[in-house]
Image (spheres, helix red, strand yellow):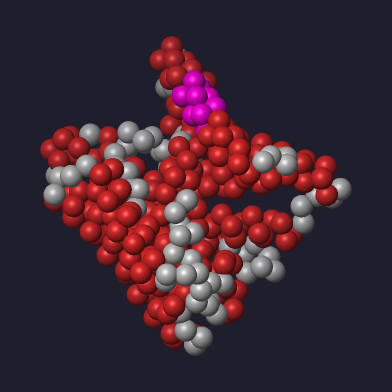
Amino acid sequence: MPQPGRRLAQALARHLGLALVIVLLVVSVIAYCALYAATQSRLPGGFEITTSVNTTMPLALAALAQSIVVMTRGLDLSIGGIIDLTNALAALYLGNTALTMVVASALILLAGAALGFVNGLLIAYGRLQPILVTLATLAIFQGLAIRILPQPGGSIPEAYTALLVNTSAPYALLYVLALALFWFGLRRSQWGIAIVAIGNDEGAAAANGIDPVRTKLLAYTLAGLIAAGGGLFLAAQATAGDATTGNGYTLTSIVAVVLGGVSLFGGRGSAVGAIFGAFVTTMIVNILFFSHIDPLYQSFYEGAFLVIAVVLAEGLGRLVRARRGKA
């Protein structure tokens, strides 16, 4: 029977990425609160907390979408383009009645799923490299977004903003909980098992009756659907549309995935960790702002922090695996 120390090591090895990102989040929140108190002579209040949560929601959805694709040993560089396009559609076609908002939102989500489906067809059935396909579709989706909304504009109904990113309290945390529950449900479903299986070993998964082609198609379609949700949240937060605001979410979604402990080689990690990684990314931006870092150098410091976090995670992973092997 395994000893308690060995069981602990095994559990830590399985959930190391998630444990590390939680520690990073706690440390970054403490650092943010300390810097805020030093500069503002008070701790962050409800407004600051709500703003941080609302700001993170589009990235949390982008990170969840990216992590599902990465689990299959793929990569989706078109997520920013999907957010751009769905953000532009939301700004133009969300009406002021409840029925119109529901119908328009559903159609926009379906449009995101269709964009992801195109990626999946080219990658799964066309057997093309994910990075090349999604880099090309990124440019196509961004071009369509600019065609639909050449200049920032449109409008988002106040009721829609209040529903998704209510500014009176961090109610958006309920959506974070919903995303986590969605992942837990997906991970335990037949589709979720297939997604992880082909990321671990596509040949072995196929030998056990899993269809890698259909699974990849599902993963990219689902990623497009979730990324479209990010576009809706971004539109609700800005109360208008901009066909270029989603551009940065492609790289930051990958950052959140890496910080969350999801392996870029597929088959390992938790999308919940990627969601936590999105909050860590937001905290880093807040910390740099209140540290009075020149915005021109913020990307440098964000990159440096990412390198340190990845090296730390890899080092801890090797240490835990070594102790597990000796146990």
The quadrant in which the N terminus is found is top left
**Percent of width and height locating residue 111:** 32, 68
Residue 276 visible in image: no
Image label count: 0
Which one is nearer the viewer's eye here, 271 or 75?
A: 75
Residue at position x 24%, y 48% from top?
Answer: 133
Q: Is 201 placed above or below 181 here? A: above
Left or right, residue 41 beside residue 299? right
> Is 313 a magenta residue?
yes
In x, y percent, where is residue 109? 37, 68
**Residue 37 vertical placement versus 162 (above, below):** above
Quarter of the rendering containing residue 51: bottom right
The residue shown at (42%, 60%) is: 83
Pick the quarter of the image with the C terminus.
Answer: top left
Does residue 118 lie above or below 71 as drawn? Answer: below
Residue under the point 42% across and 70% down? 150
Magenta part of the chain: 306-317
Q: Residue furthest top?
A: 326
Report x, y in % for residue 172: 58, 63
**What secondary structure is the magenta-colored segment mainly?**
helix
Q: In front: 143, or 49?
A: 143
Q: Decide if residue 229 is on the left or right side of residue 168.
A: left
Give left or right: position of 166 versus 325: right
Question: As rendered, which of 164 and 9 lies closer to the eye?
Answer: 164
Residue 294 in view in this figure: yes
Q: Is residue 165 above or below residue 299?
A: below
Q: Position of residue 58 (x, y in %)?
A: 50, 58
Q: Is residue 152 left or right of residue 124?
A: right
Query: In the image, is residue 182 part of the stretch drawn in magenta?
Result: no
User: What residue is shown at x 62% (from left), y 65% (from top)?
Assistant: 171
